[in-house]
Amino acid sequence: MTRQEFAELVAQDILVLDGATGSNMIKAGMPRGFCSEDWILENPQPLIDLQRSYVEAGSQIVYAPTFSCNRIGLGNFGLADRMADMNRELVALSKEAVGGRALIAGDLTTTGQMMAPRGPMTYEKLLDVYKEHVTCLLDAGVDLLGAETMLSVEETMAFVDAATSLCDLPIMCTLTLQADGTALYGGDAIEAVVTLQEMGASAVGLNCSVGPDQLEAVIRSMAEVATVPVIAKPNAGMPTITETGEAVYSMNAVDFGRSMKMLVDAGARIVGGCCGTDAEYIREVCKNVKNH
C-alpha cells in the first residue's frame, strides 16, 4: 500500500482498526510471563479466530501479532535467533485470518529499555533494532507499519527514522499517553504529532492509556496541530485486578462505542480498541462512527 492510497482511504470515511490482542490471548489460555509471539505460533487458532472476528465486525486494518518480535523482546526468552522466521510466520497467520478482507499492519513497540540518560538504550542502538524488525516485516509482506504503546517521543522518532529509511509504506504511530496528554518517559501529545508528522509518519495518535471517556481533550489538542490523521485506540476503561490476577476493564462495548464517537467529534480519523476490547467493541465503534 502506498502512502497516497492510505491517505485516500482515510479521506473516504473514518478508518477502523482492530481491538486488543494480548488480553484476548490471555483469555484463550496464554499464560502470563510467556512470550506471546511464541505462544501464538504454538497455538495459532485463537489468534486466527480473533482476527477473523475483527474483520467481520468491521476492522479495515488488523495488526499482525509481531508486537515485541524484535531482537531485544525475543532475546528475553532466548529466541532472538528466530526473529526473521517468527515475524514471517506471524504475518502469515494474520493473512490467513483476514483472507484479503483487511490490510495487515506490521506491529512494533517499545523495547522496554529506557532511553539514555534514564536507561541503557541509545538512539543509535534503537535505530538498529527497529531497522532489523522493519526489515523482517517488509520481507513478510505487510501492507503498512504501526508502532504502538510507545513510551516516549524520542523512541518513536527512532522507529519513524528506521521505517522511512527502508520503505515507502504508510507509517502509523501511537504513544501511551496519560489523561493530561503527557507520555510516560518523555514528551507530550502535541510534541508527538508535530515531530512525527514532520519526520514522515502517515498518522499519529494514542493507544492503550485510559478509556476513551478521558481522552477527548488530548485528541482535540492533537487534531489542532495535525496535518495527518489522528489515531485513537484506547483501552476499555481502567482495569481492576482480581484476586486471581485477572484484569477486568470498566467499560462495556456499548459505552465504548459511544465514547469513541466523542473522540471522532474531537478530531480522530482512525479508531480502534486496545486492552479489554474484542470484536463486540469494534462492532459498536463501527455503529457509532462509520459514515460520520
Image: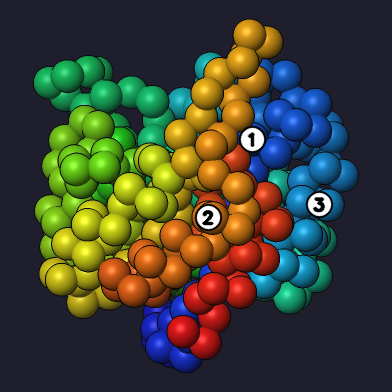
Camera-nearest residue between 163 and 261: 261
Q: Which numbered disc, 1 or 3, marks the residue that appears first in the sequence?
A: 1
Q: Residues within 10 Å of mark 3 (few under 14, many from 20)?
A: some
Camera-nearest residue between 127 and 36: 36
Please state which amino acid type lies under the numbered disc 1.
Ser
Q: Which numbered disc, 1 or 2, marks the residue that appears first in the sequence?
A: 1
The circle drawn on residue 256 is 2
Asked which quadrant contains residue 266, the reply is bottom left
Measure how far apart labels 1 and 3 are at the Cα level: 15 Å
Q: Which of marks 1 and 3 is in front?
A: 1
Please state which amino acid type lies under the numbered disc 3.
Ile
In the image, residue 9 lies at what x, y percent? Answer: 48, 85
Q: Mark 3 points at which residue?
A: 48
In the image, residue 286 lies at what x, y percent? Answer: 60, 72
Measure how far apart labels 3 and 2 are at the Cα level: 24 Å
Q: Mark 1 points at which residue?
A: 23
Q: In this view, does 149 lie above or below 270?
A: above
Q: Is residue 124 visible to us here?
A: no
Camera-nearest residue between 135 and 263: 263
Q: Is residue 97 above or below residue 34?
A: below
Secondary structure under the numbered disc 2 in the rendered image: helix
Q: Is residue 277 visible to us here?
A: yes
Q: Which of marks 3 and 2 is in front?
A: 2
Is 268 left or right of 41, judged from the image as shown? left
In the image, residue 103 lies at what x, y percent? Answer: 62, 71
Q: Which residue lies furthest to the top in this view?
A: 243
Residue at the location (71% across, 29% down)? 26
Residue at the location (14% across, 42% down)? 187
